[in-house]
């Protein structure tokens, strides 16, 4: 089987290049990895982010390469929509990894709703007007592929705990080497 592309989805408010160093570390360890260029720069923020992320996956993976989606911070709740788009494009999906990320939540919550259920998240950037109140896309039957969680920032400990309750493998590496831990988690999926 072809090794999957580790498609690194940055926080929607992160500056361009936020995942470049991690992608380089993963590549240096023999993995196929790409830091995607997706941003939430205008309304509708979530839909625009998902569309740009999907174009980036297509650019890096093509149509036959399996994709392992790796979401950071605020990209986590958008994983179901990005994954559904990969399936709609007939692109094989190897799974999902969340790296210090909020988890997708059933229904159509807003970003403002998530901290109440999952704990406060780290602020990555200044949110534009309406960003936190925008309903997130809902996707039925998620997760539709194996999932794992990497905790390197204690502010996401509650999210890691929720992942454990779901039966997902969780790597707890506060301040640790993210590349090695992501590769270990990917091998466990």
Image (spheres, rainbow, N blue to C red):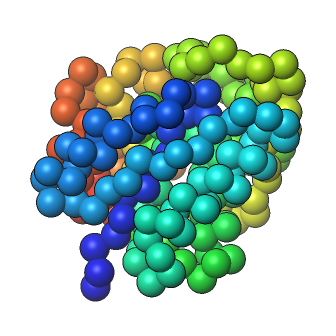
Q: Is residue 17 above or below residue 132?
A: below
Residue 171 in sight here? no
Answer with left or right where residue 29 lies relative to residue 60: left
Q: Is residue 52 visible?
A: yes
**Front position in the image: 79 or 113:** 79
**Is 176 situated left or right of 170 in this image?**
left
Residue 14 at x, y percent in the picture: 54, 28
Q: Quadrant of residue 60?
A: bottom left
Position of residue 161 measured from the top left corner of the image (x, y, whole percent) = 45, 33
Q: Total marks drawn?
A: 0
In the picture shown, does residue 35 fall above or below 125? below
User: Where does residue 147 sit, x and y in percent of width and height?
Assistant: 45, 56
In which quadrant is the N terminus drawn? bottom left
Which quadrant of the figure contains the C terminus?
bottom left
Q: Say above or below: 82 vs 4.
A: above
Foreground of the two, 154 or 164: 154
x, y percent for residue 92 = 49, 78
Picture residue at 50% right of the left edge, 38% below the top: 10
Name the residue: 47% across, 24% down: 156
Instruction: Give the residue drawn at x 69%, y 36%.
Output: 40
Q: Residue at x 34, y 69 (%)?
A: 4
Q: Is residue 119 left or right of residue 34?
A: right
Say which of 137 and 120 sits in front.
137
Between 52 and 142, the residue placed more toward the observer is 52
């Amino acid at each position: 089987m072809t090794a999957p592309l580790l498609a690194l989805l940055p926080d929607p408010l992160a500056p361009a290049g936020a995942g470049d160093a991690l992608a380089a570390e993963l590549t240096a360890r023999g993995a196929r990895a790409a830091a995607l260029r997706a941003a939430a720069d205008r309304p509708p923020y979530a839909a625009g982010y998902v569309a740009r992320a999907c174009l980036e996956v297509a650019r890096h993976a093509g149509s036959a390469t399996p994709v392992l989606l790796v979401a950071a911070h605020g990209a986590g709740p958008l994983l179901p929509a990005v994954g559904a788009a990969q399936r709609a494009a007939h692109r094989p999906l190897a799974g999902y990894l969340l790296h210090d990320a909020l988890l997708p939540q059933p229904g159509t919550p807003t970003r403002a709703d998530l901290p109440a259920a999952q704990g406060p998240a780290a602020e990555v950037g200044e949110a534009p007007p309406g960003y936190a109140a925008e309903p997130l896309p809902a996707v039925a039957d998620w997760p539709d592929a194996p999932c794992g969680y990497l905790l390197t920032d204690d502010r996401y400990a509650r999210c890691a705990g929720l992942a454990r309750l779901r039966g997902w493998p969780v790597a707890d590496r506060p301040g640790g080497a993210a590349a090695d831990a992501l590769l270990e988690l990917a091998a466990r999926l």
